[in-house]
Amino acid sequence: MKKLTMLAFALVLTMAAASAQDTKENAKETARQAGRTVDAAGGKAARETRKAGRKIDRAAKNTKEDVKDGTNKAMDKTERKLKKAERKLDNSK
């Protein structure tokens, strides 16, 4: 009977150790998955930041070009009006 009790105790102890090992491995895998999730989130944030930076750059460049085009158009219009005024003056002499 004593041998049977010792055998049952050894079996229970082995099962407990195996269960603890499984729990340890599951905890490690969960930690690894959490690490990968954090890395992926960080990577996505970096990509989105770069994307936003490129959009801002493009918008600034387009705004600069729009201002330049507007200024050139205004100067051309003013120049045409001055030439027209000069012709009127010349014709009135």
Image (tube, grey):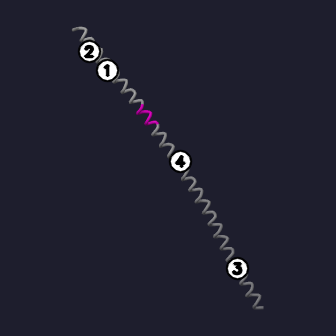
Query: In whole angstroms, how far apart are the C-alphas of marks 1 and 2?
Result: 11 Å
Q: Is residue 90 left or right of residue 30?
A: right
Q: Is residue 43 left or right of residue 20?
A: right
* Vertical relation: 9 (above or below) 90: above
User: Where is residue 6 drawn, in percent x and y?
Assistant: 27, 11
Q: In this view, does 62 lie to the left or right of 92?
A: left
Name the residue tied to disc 4. Answer: 47
Of pointers 2 and 4, the one earlier in the residue sequence? 2
Of pointers 3 and 4, the one earlier in the residue sequence? 4
Q: What stretch is highlighted in magenta?
A: 29-35
Q: Are the two marked residues, 3 and 4, in contact with CB atoms closer than 8 angstroms?
A: no
Which of pointers 3 and 4 indicates the residue nearer the eye? 4
Placement of the N terminus among the 4 image quadrants:
top left
Amino acid type of the residue that numbered disc 4 sits on in the rendered structure: Arg
Name the residue tied to disc 2. Answer: 8
User: Where is residue 32 drawn, in percent x and y?
Assistant: 44, 33
Q: Residue at x 63, y 63 (%)?
A: 64
* Vertical relation: 33 (above or below) 65: above
Few, some or many C-alpha atoms within 10 Å of disc 1 (few <14, some 14-19, many ≥20)?
A: few
User: Where is residue 46 drawn, in percent x and y?
Assistant: 53, 46
Query: In whole angstroms, how far apart are the C-alphas of marks 2 and 4?
Result: 58 Å
Q: Residue at x 56, y 52 (%)?
A: 53
Which of pointers 1 and 4 indicates the residue nearer the eye? 1
Few, some or many C-alpha atoms within 10 Å of disc 3 (few <14, some 14-19, many ≥20)?
A: few
Of pointers 3 and 2, the one earlier in the residue sequence? 2
Principal secondary structure, stretch drawn in magenta: helix
Residue 48, magenta (yes or no): no
Q: Are the two marked residues, 3 and 1, in contact with CB atoms closer than 8 angstroms?
A: no
Name the residue tied to disc 1. Answer: 15
Query: In whole angstroms, how far apart are the C-alphas of marks 3 and 4?
Result: 49 Å
Q: Are the two marked residues, 2 and 4, in contact with CB atoms closer than 8 angstroms?
A: no
Of pointers 3 and 1, the one earlier in the residue sequence? 1
